[in-house]
Amino acid sequence: MQAPQVGGCQVKPGTRELQGGEMESIYLQKHLGTCLTQGLAEVARIRPVDPIEYLALWIYKYKENVTMEQLRQKEMANLERERELAEIEQEMMERLKAEELLFQQQQLAFQLELEMQEKERQRIEELQRAQEQLEKEMRINMENIAKSEDSSHAEDVTSDSGKTLAEISDRYGAPNLSRVEELDEPMLSDVALNIDQDL
């Protein structure tokens, strides 16, 4: 007779019960181990009159407590997630505010730069206009001076032509002929006579 197979492996007689018991033990330990251990410890500590009813109520309450704890943990996880999202949103808002402030500062600096360039351009234009005006006034003055010199020279020439040498000599820079003293010089004829006599 052949031994029965479980999952492709041969199982010796009597081992099947052991495996089933082992599986049940794992199941009970997984699902009831903590609950039963704590419940039995509570029954041993309290020593109620009806320990079975007390253990049944304790296990029922334990189930509620576990459910409430799971809900609380889920709620805490949701709150933590919402807090993290709020922090991320707050950081994003602060970053946006910082970027907006930086943008405003850049705009203000750019606007100030444009205003300074405009003022500088206006100042240069004013200087150029003032320089052109000054050059124009200087040309007009030079032309007027040249015309007045020409006309005064022409007047001097026309007025000087009818004047005597003494009147002309009163002008600045001309020799003062009225002050020139004439020395008594011997006449040429007298000198010539003296020479003839000596010979």
Image (spheres, helix red, strand yellow):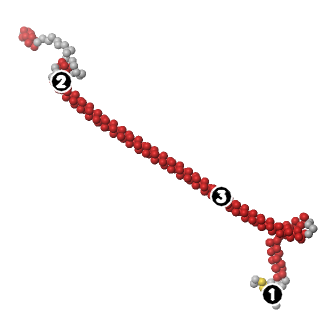
Q: Position of residue 79 (x, y in %)?
A: 70, 61
- Examine the rendered structure and indicate whether residue 192 appears above or below residue 130: above
Instruction: Give me the residue at 82% from left, 74% from top.
Output: 28
Label 2 sits on residue: 160
SS at badge 2: helix
Marks 3 and 2, how far apart at CA: 107 Å
Marks 1 and 2, how far apart at CA: 164 Å
Marks 3 and 1, how far apart at CA: 65 Å
The amino acid type found where label 3 is placed reads: Ala
In the picture, measured across the screen, residue 198 lies left or right of residue 38, that is left
Q: Quarter of the image holding residue 92? A: bottom right
The numbered dot on residue 86 is 3
Instruction: Give me the residue at 16% from left, 20% from top.
Output: 164
N-term mark: 3 or 1: 1
Badge nearest the viewer, 3 or 1: 3
Label 1 sits on residue: 3
Q: Is residue 175 visible?
A: no
Q: Position of residue 1 (x, y in %)?
A: 82, 90
Using the image as rendered, state which of residue 126 and residue 178 is in the foreground.
126
* Residue at the extreme top: 197
Q: Quarter of the image holding residue 83? A: bottom right
Badge nearest the viewer, 1 or 2: 2
Instruction: Give me the residue at 46% from left, 47% from top.
Output: 114
In the picture, measured across the screen, residue 94 lies left or right of residue 123, that is right
Using the image as rendered, state which of residue 25 and residue 182 is in the foreground.
25
Q: Position of residue 192 (x, y in %)?
A: 8, 12
Q: Is disc 1 surrounded by few (<14), some (14 to 19) or many (20+) residues within 10 Å?
A: few
Q: Is residue 110 visible?
A: yes
SS at badge 3: helix
In the picture, measured across the screen, residue 31 lies left or right of residue 194, that is right
The C terminus is located in which quarter? top left
SS at badge 1: loop
